[in-house]
Amino acid sequence: MRNFFLFICLFPLFGLAQDDLLSEIDTVQADNQTESSFKSLKIVNLESTKLAAKKDLYFVVAHRFDYLEHGFDDFFGLDNANTQLKFVYGLTDWLTVHVARSGFQETYDVAAKYRLVYQKEGCALFTIVGFNSLAINTEMKEDDFPDMSFSNRLSYVTQLLISRRFNEALSLELAPTFFHENTIRDTFADDGTIILPNPQDNSQFALGMGGRYKITKRWSVNLDYVAHLNRASESIYTNPLSIGMDLETGGHVFQMHFTNSRAMHESGFLGQTSGRWDKGEICFGFNLVRVF
């Protein structure tokens, strides 16, 4: 495990010797369209307004570890990895689809991302992209929930991603969000007992915000945050806050980040983030993005 951790720390340095990927991951600039606001498909947790080019296939291997607060007991969370494998495909230059499997709640999810407006000089001030996902929680067992139907496993997310590239270095994004969980997690009273019926609405609203600041030709600092707008006051969950860095190298993008969310699929980090930065409940994670 120590060797693995050392590899993660040194991996970006090895990538510096590879060919530049900028020509492969930039959105093509045509007519007066502005270059893509983001170089990666995600900021950290939030989807960015970048889409896969037509017929491009991305393979994403994402790892999110447990909280750092446990220290050497679990080697700062590295003993408890949550993994997501994802395939992303550009059906057209304006429509991207993905399918993924996450260790968090043994979740499968499918999604579509589609461009509505492209930022153009002297015309559109923003790029606007729609995003819809469907997640299936396969961790729920019929032995524990004998009256469960397939629909109880489902959750849905709808987002409008609005970004602007202000200059070569700075891009910002807002993400008004609606999501619906057919089954909501337990809510607890101060004495630890479960509150029934659960006061949390199945239909929930949030506002995501994020940005990217490019500090060198290859490196950028990324940050995103999601404010839940109708969370029940008794809820044990909190808002996800994430900060990370992207490294653009030959053949792939390498993302490293710290976040209070162990979930990586949308409905998971939107509704079920339990970590708190002020208590040291922070996870280290990384994504390796390969485009074919």
Image: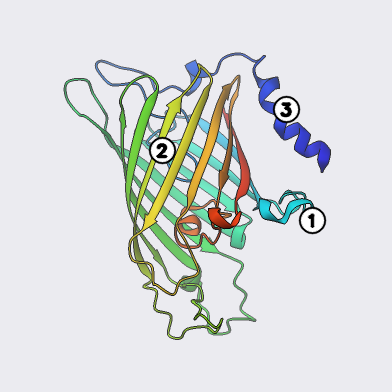
Please identify, in this view, whether the residue under mark 2 or under mark 3 is nearer the observer: 3
Marks 1 and 2, Cα distance to the nearest angstrom?
A: 35 Å
Instruction: Evaluate if marks 1 and 2 touch, with contact meaning CB atoms under 8 Å apart.
Output: no
Q: Which mark is residue 73?
A: 1
Seen at 59% across and 26% down, the residue is 252
Instruction: Please determine whether, in this image, residue 169 is positioned above or below residue 181.
Output: above
**Which residue has dot 3 on it?**
10
Mark 1 or mark 2, which has the lower sequence index? Answer: 2
Instruction: Evaluate if marks 2 and 3 touch, with contact meaning CB atoms under 8 Å apart.
Output: no
Instruction: Please determine whether, in this image, residue 158 is positioned above or below residue 96.
Output: below
The x and y percentages for residue 37 are 37, 28
Dividing the picture into quadrants, the one containing residue 287 is top right
The amino acid marked with disc number 1 is Asp
The amino acid marked with disc number 3 is Leu
**Which residue has dot 2 on it?**
48
Please tell me how crowded label 1 is: few (under 14), some (14-19), or many (20+) other residues with Cα within 10 Å. few
Marks 2 and 3, Cα distance to the nearest angstrom?
A: 27 Å
Marks 3 and 1, Cα distance to the nearest angstrom?
A: 23 Å
In the image, taking residue 106 as reference, residue 41 lies left or right, namely: left
Which quadrant would the C terminus be assigned to in this image? top right
- Decide which of 266, 7 is in the foreground and name it: 7
Q: Tell which residue pokes out farthest to the front in this image.
A: 278
The amino acid marked with disc number 2 is Ser
